[in-house]
């Protein structure tokens, strides 16, 4: 036990939030998460990318909501009350990510992270920086910066 | 003094400097009108002197040295040793600019190239005929020096035949806060003659309760001098309003005792809104106080009541809170309407007054952020001088409406685009002096910057009386750069507008001055970022005018709440000309989809908002819809088709850009009573893409 703890200290651990989108497991650093809230109706944005569900009011701020499933090419989500919006801070922007369910907060080591094999197509590699294998589960780690629409302009 | 305190003092010193520099600029502007107005000269001198004083307290040596030299030169004019002329005024202005630079550099802890100071000092010496070596001896010491503060020695000088004054000087508690230092005053008196200073420390609190920022010391000064009483009072000029002062000629204790009048300092006082407390003359005064001269008021200077300085963050917080209050109020009224209380019930009445109060608070809080455009205009006068010098053109700078108030953020963010357009006006707009003379114009060109309010917006015009846009050249350049095709038939207004296209200005075309690799397109996008627009109008041979129209505040907007395809949207009232029922008006279809509305003013394109935003396909049947006739600042119009009009109300503007980005046709978002977000439509943007051109070539538009 003692040794295990020592070993832990030698390798930095950090926490990730794990969630499900279209029956697949994903995660990203917990430090980016501001809060997790239930689905609320959004206000549609004209000419937005299909994966931009619209904007919601987060205590006075206008926050866009991105349908992760559609963004990752896994099909559009038909959001209902059981869905969650993970409010994340990416750079200077606050963005809501629509997911099916948040499953865990996991403490992981860098060594748990495996690079994704080359055979996976480029589109996926753009969003996924690696895969965590924990207790037999495959958890894809997201590159949050890539998830964002670079600007509303790229919708046109 | 703790570090934090010093920082506070420093910050307030620099804020004060801003005001003093502004007062100084005002003075120069006033001098341009009347070179020999001694009142103005005094005001300028005082401003520079006060900056020097404060700078000394913070050990800003470069600033002190230059301010002192500048002040000395100003004094030669003030005292009438030399006469001011236009050249000297110009030099003073340059020195004023340099002083601003020094202040800015000191604020940031930077150093400026000392050669700039040296060059100006030499110019000042040459202009005022001062002996540069003699001057430095005059430098006041800001090191503390030992003064005779012997408490036992209160006896006046024995020989009553000595000419001189007995001065009682009692500082107000806020003397230090105003940047004054009694020691400096006493040093000034010492130059007049033999001085004995006695401090009265009776009022000073014990050390443990001592407030070191407030002055509780009184002084009795005994001055043996041949100088006049006026000269003695002059030394106290800068503490007027911060002290009680009695000056009695020695041996004449019954002499008139007059309180210091604050009226000698109208300009500075007006600007800083400091009302000097009027002290009652002591009862034993047997004669009437010296009559005060009527304070000079300038007709165009609105009198302002006292002001306070508030941290902007506090105001912003308040504005956010008020925004929330208004939203909550709307939520509350919505739920109450749903309950449907009987009319005239307490609930309904209470709600009404709550609404009223909320909207008044909102208005009041918004007004806090409003500030006159004047400081910005003053900054621009410097840009004009520099640009004129760089292009060797003679430029007169005129301002109109400098007390027009605009939200502080708007003012701040306007500096860059305005700078750019003013440089552009001087560099490209105005001709050189010879050219102008050849055309029969005065050699001196004029650039006018004006501000005015118009229907909830502020209009800022930058106009020059130069040659106007060289349309042939602009056209050629646009063709060369591939912005338009060679065959394109453009109206004069359209050619002028090419100047705003990105990529219009290119490296080789850009001169040293307006260069910096940005074109008017950048200035325009900055203005658009503020919810503003800019247009250009030009008359060949008579000049060019850039007109900027901006919202008064970036925080609230009077809007019409509409519904389109189940989406709630807000349309700014300011843009709406009228609302129409399609049933009662003529709508014609041109081509497959194009529709126009015909009314008194002609043909107006009809745009279905729902279709434009991609919420639904175009609606064929307009009968059950409503049409909003909207107009741009440029006079272009279009008819927006919406489903219904719900309400009209003030909405708090929330940025869409912060977390998302720009959306075409949408300027911002707001939060509705039910907590949901509604987008605010940008009619200007829609019209720019689709509307009728302001010029009369409507037919072209419809065919093409």
Image (cartoon, coloured by chain):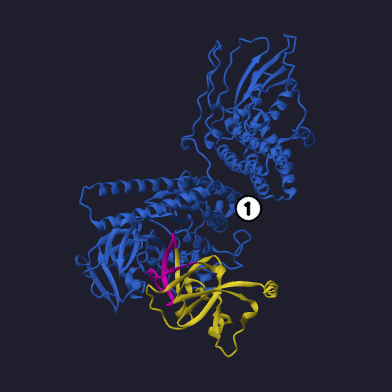
Chain colours: A yellow, B blue
- Name the residue rendered at 56%, 82% in the picture: A135
- The furthest residue to the front: A1
The chain letter under disc 1 is: B
Q: Can residue B459 be seen from the camera position used here?
A: no
In which quadrant of the rendered image does the C terminus of chain A lie? bottom left
Q: In the rendered view, tell whether residue B333 sits above or below residue A108.
A: above
Residue B335 x/y as whole percent: 29, 57
Q: Nearer the viewer, residue B398 or B629?
A: B629
- Name the residue rendered at 75%, 48% in the picture: B115
Q: In the rendered view, tell whether residue B539 sits above or below residue B264.
A: below
Q: Nearer the viewer, residue B473 or B558?
A: B558
Residue B391 x/y as whole percent: 62, 55
Q: Which residue is identified by label 1?
A: B392
What is the magenta range?
Answer: A35-61
Residue B230 lies within the magenta run:
no
- The furthest residue to the right: B133
Q: Can residue A116 be seen from the camera position used here?
A: yes
């Amino acid at each position: 036990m003692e040794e295990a703890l020592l070993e832990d200290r030698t390798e930095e651990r950090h926490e990730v939030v794990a969630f499900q989108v279209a029956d697949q497991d994903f995660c990203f650093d917990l430090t980016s998460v501001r809060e997790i809230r239930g689905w609320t109706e959004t206000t549609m944005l004209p000419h937005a990318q299909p994966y931009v569900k619209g904007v919601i009011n987060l205590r006075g701020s206008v926050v866009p909501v991105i349908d992760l499933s559609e963004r990752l090419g896994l099909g559009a989500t038909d959001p209902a009350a059981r869905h969650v919006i993970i409010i994340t801070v990416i750079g200077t922007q606050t963005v809501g990510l629509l997911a099916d369910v948040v499953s865990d907060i996991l403490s992981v080591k860098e060594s748990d992270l495996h690079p994704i094999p080359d055979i996976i197509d480029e589109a996926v590699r753009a969003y996924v920086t690696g895969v965590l294998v924990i207790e037999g589960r495959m958890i894809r780690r997201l590159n949050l910066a890539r998830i964002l629409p670079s600007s509303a302009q790229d919708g046109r | 003094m703790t570090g934090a305190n010093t920082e506070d003092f420093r910050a307030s010193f620099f804020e004060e400097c801003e005001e003093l520099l502004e007062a100084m600029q005002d003075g120069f502007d006033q001098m341009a009108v009347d070179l020999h107005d001694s009142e103005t000269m005094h005001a300028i001198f005082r401003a520079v002197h006060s900056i020097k004083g404060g700078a000394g307290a913070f050990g800003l040596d470069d600033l002190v040295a230059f301010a002192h030299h500048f002040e000395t030169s100003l004094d030669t004019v003030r005292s009438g040793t030399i006469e001011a002329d236009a050249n000297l005024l110009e030099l003073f202005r340059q020195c004023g600019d340099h002083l601003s630079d020094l202040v800015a550099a000191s604020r940031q802890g930077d150093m400026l190239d000392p050669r700039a100071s040296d060059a100006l000092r030499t110019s000042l010496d040459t202009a005022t005929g001062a002996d540069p070596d003699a001057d430095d001896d005059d430098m006041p010491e800001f090191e503390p020096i030992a003064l005779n503060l012997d408490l036992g020695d209160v006896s006046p000088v024995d020989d009553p035949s000595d000419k001189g004054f007995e001065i009682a000087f009692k500082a107000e508690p806020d003397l230090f806060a105003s940047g004054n230092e009694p020691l400096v005053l006493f040093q000034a008196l010492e130059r007049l003659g033999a001085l004995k200073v006695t401090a009265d420390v009776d009022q000073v609190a014990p050390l443990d309760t001592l407030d070191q920022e407030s002055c509780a010391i009184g002084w009795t000064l005994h001055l043996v001098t041949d100088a006049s009483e006026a000269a003695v009072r002059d030394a106290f000029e800068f503490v007027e309003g911060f002290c009680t002062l009695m000056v009695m000629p020695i041996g004449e204790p019954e002499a008139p005792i007059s309180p210091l009048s604050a009226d000698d300092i109208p300009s500075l006082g007006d600007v800083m809104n400091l009302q000097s407390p009027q002290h009652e003359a002591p009862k034993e005064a047997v004669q009437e106080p010296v009559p005060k001269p009527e304070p000079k008021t300038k007709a165009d200077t609105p009198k302002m009541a006292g002001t306070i300085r508030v941290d902007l963050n506090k105001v912003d917080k308040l504005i956010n809170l008020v925004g929330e209050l208004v939203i909550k109020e709307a939520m509350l009224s919505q739920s109450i309407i749903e309950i449907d209380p009987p009319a005239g019930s307490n609930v309904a009445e209470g709600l009404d007054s709550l609404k009223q109060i909320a909207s008044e608070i909102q208005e009041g809080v918004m007004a806090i952020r409003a500030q006159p455009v004047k400081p910005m205009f003053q900054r621009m006068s410097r840009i004009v001088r520099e640009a004129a010098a760089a292009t060797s053109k003679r430029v007169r700078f005129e301002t109109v409406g400098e007390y027009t108030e605009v939200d502080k953020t708007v003012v701040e963010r306007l500096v860059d685009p305005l700078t750019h357009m003013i440089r552009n006006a001087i560099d490209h707009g105005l001709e050189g002096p010879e050219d102008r003379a050849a055309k029969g114009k005065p050699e001196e060109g004029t650039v006018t910057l004006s501000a005015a309010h118009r229907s909830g917006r502020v209009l800022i015009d930058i106009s020059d009386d130069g040659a106007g846009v060289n349309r042939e050249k602009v056209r050629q350049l646009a063709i060369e750069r591939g912005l338009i095709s060679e065959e394109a038939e453009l109206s004069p207004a359209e050619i002028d507008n090419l100047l705003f296209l990105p990529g219009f200005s290119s490296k080789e075309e850009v001169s040293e001055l307006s260069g910096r690799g940005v074109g008017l397109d950048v200035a325009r996008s900055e203005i658009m970022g503020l919810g503003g627009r800019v247009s250009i109008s030009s008359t060949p041979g008579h000049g060019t005018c850039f007109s900027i129209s901006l919202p008064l505040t970036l925080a609230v907007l009077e809007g019409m709440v509409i519904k389109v395809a189940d989406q709630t949207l807000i349309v700014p009232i300011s843009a709406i000309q009228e609302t129409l029922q399609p049933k009662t008006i003529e709508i014609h279809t041109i081509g497959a989809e194009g529709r126009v509305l015909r009314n008194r003013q002609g043909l107006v394109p009809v745009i279905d908002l729902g279709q434009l935003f991609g919420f639904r396909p175009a609606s064929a049947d307009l009968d059950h819809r409503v049409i909003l006739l909207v107009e741009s600042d440029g006079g272009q119009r279009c008819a927006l088709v919406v489903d219904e009009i719900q309400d009209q109300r003030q909405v708090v503007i929330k940025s869409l850009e912060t977390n998302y980005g720009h959306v075409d046709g949408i300027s911002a978002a707001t939060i509705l009573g039910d907590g949901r977000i509604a987008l605010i439509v940008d009619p200007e943007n829609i019209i720019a893409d689709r509307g009728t051109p302001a010029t009369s070539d409507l037919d072209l538009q419809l065919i093409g």
